[in-house]
Amino acid sequence: MGVRILRAGVIAGLVGGVLFEAFLIAVLVVAYREPLVPTIVSSFQFVAAGAIGKSTAFTSPAFAWLGAVVHFVVSIGWATGYAYLAQTREQLLSQPLVSGVFFGVIVFAMMQVILLAAGLFASPTSIGLLTQLTAHCVFFGIPVAYVVARLMR
């Protein structure tokens, strides 16, 4: 894998990961009036639960750091995969809006499978599904596609 692909993947993954998490936290804080800091901590503890299990991840707020690391490693991994595919598929670079939306749907679907395998899947409400799809498509997929397109041209 080339340096250009890795660079694009890391930068796009960090941008997409930050925007994704910021959107979800903003929804919880604004729409559901959740307190900011506990929302951030519990959000990352949930991510950590995928790696170490629910019974451990929610025992201490310190596991939020592990969740943050896992979140960004996964985000960078998805974005690097996108950058790798983009090097041979011009349409991913020439149409980042459309490509980003489809990429977001794929990431959403695969992450649901991972949650299911980890025993963390919960059937979402219609609002929850819309929120998750928006987060994955608009705040992750599209930014990743635009950053990769910009860095790989």
Image (tube, helix red, strand yellow):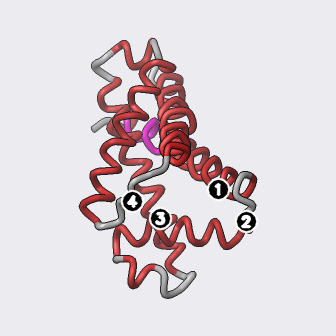
* Residue 85: % across, % down: 30, 28
Q: Which amino acid does label 4 sit on?
A: Ala
- Quick one: label 3, few (<14), some, or many (20+) residues within 10 Å? some
Q: Do the residues labelled 2 and 4 touch (CB within 8 Å)?
A: no
Mark 3 residue element: helix
Q: Does residue 63 show up magenta in the picture?
A: no
Mark 2 residue element: helix
Residue at numbered disc 3: 69
Q: Are marks 1 and 3 in contact (CB under 8 Å)?
A: no
Q: Which amino acid does label 3 sit on?
A: Val
Q: In which quarter of the image is residue 55?
A: bottom left
Question: Magenta segment, principal secondary structure?
Answer: helix
Earlier along the polypeptide chain: callout 2 or callout 1? 1
Earlier along the polypeptide chain: callout 1 or callout 3? 1
Location of residue 33 with respect to 101 vertically, above or below: below
- Quick one: label 4, few (<14), some, or many (20+) residues within 10 Å? few
* Residue 151: % across, % down: 50, 27
Q: Which amino acid does label 1 sit on?
A: Ile
Mark 4 or 3, which is nearer the eye? 4
Mark 1 residue element: helix
Marks 2 and 1, Cα distance to the nearest angstrom? 8 Å
Residue at numbered disc 2: 36
* Residue 18: % across, % down: 59, 49
Q: Please state which of residues 119 and 60 is positioned toward the viewer in this rendering.
A: 119
Marks 1 and 4, Cα distance to the nearest angstrom? 18 Å
